[in-house]
Image (cartoon, rainbow, N blue to C red):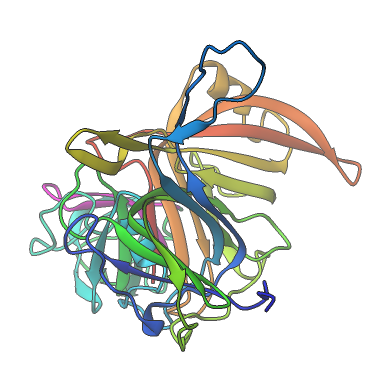
Amino acid sequence: MSLLTNKRVIIAKLESTYGVDASPTGADALLLRNLDLMPLEGDVVQRDFIRPYFGSSGEIRVSNFAKLDFEVELVGSGTAGVAPPWGKLLTACAFTETLLASAVTGTAQAGGSSTTIKLAAGASAVDGAYNGGTVSITAGASNGDSREIISYNGTTKIATVSKAFTTTPDATSSYSIGAMAQYAPTSAFGTSTSLSLYFNLDGTRHILLGARGTFTMDMSAKALPVMKFSFTGLLGTISDAVLPSVSFSGFQVPQTISTANTTNLNLQGYNNAILEKLTFDIANSVTYRQLVGAESVLITNRKPTGNASIEAVAVGTKDWWTAAKSAATGPFGVKHGLTPGNIISVTSQSMQITAPKYSDSDGIAMFEFGMQFMPINGNDEFVIVAK
């Protein structure tokens, strides 16, 4: 009986012990697209006999693993402060998940500026705790302003925002930082940092264990925002298994990248860019490693990069060329979505422009450039937030 390619499903669950099957169920199903399974990867050795005649000697496999690539729409859970269903995928790509279940409110202290606010003395003492969040001024100076937080210093309580406030916040400014799910990179692996992935093709099931990976993001105009994942996993069993009953209830409908839905773009302090293309690559180094006594998939490094295309402007408006020549760094930020629970932000404290050039789009001169995102204190170069 033929197997139908339209009857495919992936279910995924974080493992409490590395490489030990977490037994995902239909409730762990992923709503995805552009699925590609590489079911049997690995190394072989050739036998290469010396014989008095031509012919192959055959080969023997010495390592076996599998790879799985797919895309997931970039949209929140529907409820601010609740992890989106793709959060577990980021966790298996060396990101930590921190949930701010409810809004943090307070009254600012004196000492802010046009692009900073000094939060209350009782605000978090953890650097980066509010990175990627939205701070809204609810009373006092700059009342009504909402800004994206690019960076936060837990010692000074200073939050730097993506766009200047209308008025400098002061001790009269009450604020609220909305509930959110924050994803920041990590360089360490504890428990629950790998996935058990089940791929089922119309009754044939492939199991990947200890899966870890990397991903890219595309937030280009006139398209849906997506994350493109590539996972490598230890080869589990391949067997006949009934397609599970699945639920995709946690997946929301995304909004297109557009002027109305995509705001607060910050490119090294420049807030007026007209954006056509925007992509990111987390660029994890993912390695399958097998030695005597150990087999695992490791993430050994990352060097996040990006690419953008914006309408070119006069040097007097923004001198991108000097910024590129001097290897200047500055903040980056973008916000997508309008309704709490379905808002995504991507921020960086330290972005560098690379390889600038001109291009054409509908007869309009465009400025294309690469981006590198670099840490300041470590594990803080790139933050994704669903809020």
Magenta-drawn stretch, dominant element (helix, strand or loop): strand
In percent of width and height, residue 245 lies at: 46, 89
In percent of width and height, residue 367 lies at: 72, 35
Verify whether residue 346 appears in magenta. Answer: no
Residue drawn where x is 38% and y is 38% of the image: 63
Q: What stretch is highlighted in magenta?
A: 146-162
Left or right, 119 with respect to 88, comes to left
Seen from the viewer's position, the closer of residues 199 and 3 is 3
Verify whether residue 158 appears in magenta. Answer: yes
Residue 241 in sight in this render: yes
Instruction: Tell me the quadrant of the picture where the N terminus can be found.
Output: bottom right
In percent of width and height, residue 78 lies at: 43, 83
In percent of width and height, residue 378 lies at: 24, 37
- Above or below, 225 against 318 in this view is below
Instruction: Tell me the quadrant of the picture where the C terminus can be found.
Output: bottom left
Say which quarter of the image contains residue 181.
bottom left
Q: How many marks?
A: 0
Left or right, 237 with respect to 56, comes to left
- Above or below, 189 against 199 in this view is above
Residue 79 in sight in this render: no
Seen from the viewer's position, the closer of residues 319 and 60 is 60
